[in-house]
Image (cartoon, rainbow, N blue to C red):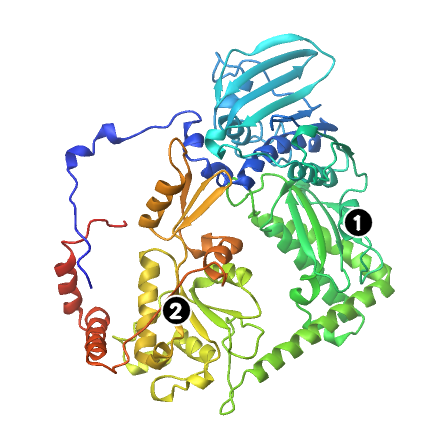
Amino acid sequence: MSDLFEITIPNSDEYSAQSIQVLEGLEPVRHRPGMYIGGVDEQALHHLVAEILDNSMDEAVAGYANRIDVVLNADYSVTIIDNGRGIPIDAHPKYPNKSALEVIMTTLHSGGKFGGNAYKVSGGLHGVGLSVVNALSDKLVVEIAREKKLYRQIYSKGVPQGELEFIGNTTRKGTSITFHPDEEIFGVGAKLIPNKIYRMSRSKAFLFKGIKILWKCSPEVLSENDLTPSEAELHFPNGLKDFLDYQIGEKETVNRNIFFGESELANDEGKVEWAITWPLDENGFTYSYCNTVITPQGGTHELGFKTALLRSLKEYGEMANIKKAAQITSEDFLSDAAIILSLFIRDPQFQGQTKDKLTSAKATRLVEQAVKDSFDHWLTSDMENANALIEYVIERSEARKKKKEEKVQNRKTPTKRLRLPGKLADCSQNEPHDTEIFIVEGDSAGGSAKQGRDRVTQAILPLKGKILNVASASLEKILQNQEIKDLVEALGCGTKDNFREENLRYEKVIIMTDADVDGAHIASLLMTFFYQQMPKLIEGGHLYIATPPLYKVANGSKVFYAIDDEDKDKILAKEFKGNSKPDISRFKGLGEMSAMQLKETTMDKKRRTLLKVLIPNNVTEESREYAFETRRMVDRLMGKNPEPRFNFIIEKAKFVNDLDI
C-alpha cells in the first residue's frame, strides 16, 4: 500500500465567528436550489411551473376559482392566471411596513395553508413554493385583482424592484404571475418545454372536474415537429374516468366497464377519486396524486387503494366459492392494472419539498375504508364482469407460480437440490452466460437496484448490514451466519474444497456498496469472504466492484456524476468554467439514488465502470511474492489480532490529509 495520505492540523485561529455565514431571506434558495426543487436540471426547471400552477389549483379545489390560464410566452417566461380570491395585499400584522403579498413573495414558510382556515386541502404545505420560484427567477411580475382594484409588483431574483403599485380599477379578480427562470441558476440556454407544460396543465384539468384550463403557447417556442397545440381549452367533466379513457384509448380490457368513482373520507378529512381498468396483454401503469400534486413514487394513498381492492377481490372469491382466489397476490392483481388515483386530504405529509411520495400514515386507512365498499358493490352488481376479472387474475397467479417453479427447477445443479434465498431477486435467464448478481447492502439499496436492473440478466441479493468478517471468525460462527448462507446458496458453487466453478450460477459477481467509507468497509469484508472462502472464484475472473458516484454535478441540462472528490474537481475544472455555478449534491447512499440514476451510472452494461478483483496465480516468482503479500495484508488488516491493525493505522496516519467525517 503506497504512502498517499498526510494529516493536516488546521490552525484554530482560522475558525472563528467570522467563519460563520448567515444566509438571510431567499439567499438559501439561490445558494442551494436543489434543497427546494430537487436540483437545477430540466425536471427542476419545470417544477417551478408546477409550484405556481398548484397554487391556482388550490384556489379551485377550495371552491374560489373555476378558470386558470397557462401561457408559455415567446421569451420562455410563463404566465399563470386564476380567477380566485387573489393574494392579500393589505399590511401584514407581523410586518406592518410590508404587504402580505411581499411577505409571501420574499419569506420562506409564509402562506395561508398552515392554519387550516383559508384552505381545507391544498398541495402547498410549507409556504415555500411561490417564494422559491421568485428567488430562482430573474424577473417575476405579480398582479393581484381584489375588490375591483388591480395591483402590481415586480421582483428580480427574489428582491422587490419597487413598492406594490396600484394600477387601476378592474372587473376581474384573482392572481396573475409571470416569471422567467434565472439562467444563472439553470444555465444559459435552459428552456421550458411546451409539451411538458401542456401535459402538466391537462393532467390538472383531469384531476379536478370543476376547473377549466385555457392553454396558450407562443408560436415562436414551438419547433416544426412539435405537435403541442398552440391553444386549447382543457375541461373534463368526468374527471379521472376521462383521464383513463384518454390513456387507454382503443386498447382491449379484461373488464367491460372501468371501475371509477369518488368517496368522502371519514371524519371530514377530504375525498378520494379513482379510475382503474385492466388492459389485456398490455403493461399497466399507476398515476397517483395528492391534492392535485403528482406523487411519482406513490405512497400511503396507493397502499390503501391497492389493499382495499385486493381484500375485496379475495372476499368476493371466497363468497363465490372460488378456492384459488385465496392465493392471489397484489402482484397478480394490480401489477399490470391501469390506475389513476387522486386524493384530497387535510395536512398531507410528503417526502421532501418536491412531494414525490405521500407519507401520511392516516391516508392508508382512510383510502382503504373509502374505496373498499365501492369495489365490493362494483363486483357484486355485475358478476359476469367480476368473474372475468377474477379468472384473469387467477390465471396470472397460476402462471406466476409455474414460472417460479420452472425457474428453480431449471437452475438446480445435477448433484444437489438448490434452495434460493427468499430475498434474492433472480434473473430470468437460465444459462450463466452474460448473467450478473449484484450484492448490495440493505433493502433500500436493494429496492432501487431491483427497479433499475435488466431482469433478464441481472440478479439482486440485498444483505442486511455488514457481513461477518470471516478472517477473524470461527468456522462455527461462519456456518451459522445467515447472510453468508444466503450468499453461498445464491451463487450455488460451494466454498473452499467444495467449490465448483461449473456450478456458479452467474458469470459476474458484483459487489455494489455506497461510495463512502462505510461502503468501502463492506466491500472489504465481502472481498475478504471471497478471498478466503472462494479464492477460485476470484482467480476465474468472476468478482467485480461496482463504482457508483458520490456526487451529482448539474447546471441546467448539463449533468455529470463524479466517483469521488478528485473526479468532481476534474469535472468542475473541465465542464464548468467561468461564472457557471453548478449544483453539487452528494449521495448519502445507493438507496438515496433513484432507480434510473443507479441504472445509468452503475448498472447499465454500456455505460458503467467495473473494477475487476484479481489475485496473483502463483505461477512466477513475482506473482508468488504478490500472493504472499496479499495474504499477509489480509491477515494484518482483517485478522483476529487487533494489534497489527493498530500498528498499521499508527504507521500510516501521518500520510492522511483528508478525513471524511
- The residue drawn where x is 65% and y is 39% is 196
- The residue drawn where x is 41% and y is 57% is 548
On residue 544, the disc is 2
Q: Could you tell me which quadrant the N terminus lies in?
A: bottom left
**Distance (Cα) linking label 2 and label 1:** 48 Å
Image coordinates of residue 537 in percent, x first then y, are 37, 79
Q: Of marks 2 and 1, which one's residue comes earlier in the chain?
A: 1
Q: Would residue 559 appear left or right of 388 to someone viewing this image? A: left
Q: Would residue 327 appear left or right of 580 to someone viewing this image? A: right
- Above or below for 374 versus 427: above
Q: Amino acid at mark 2?
A: Tyr
Q: Amino acid at mark 1?
A: Asp
Residue 109 seen in the figure:
no
- Above or below for 14 versus 86: below
Image coordinates of residue 425 in percent, x first then y, are 53, 70
Pointer 2 local density, CA inside 10 Å: few below 14, some 14–19, many at least 20: many
- The residue drawn where x is 65% and y is 45% is 289
Q: Would residue 273 appear left or right of 352 to someone viewing this image? A: right
Residue 428 seen in the figure:
yes
Q: Nearer the viewer, mark 2 or mark 1?
A: 2
Residue designated by label 1: 245
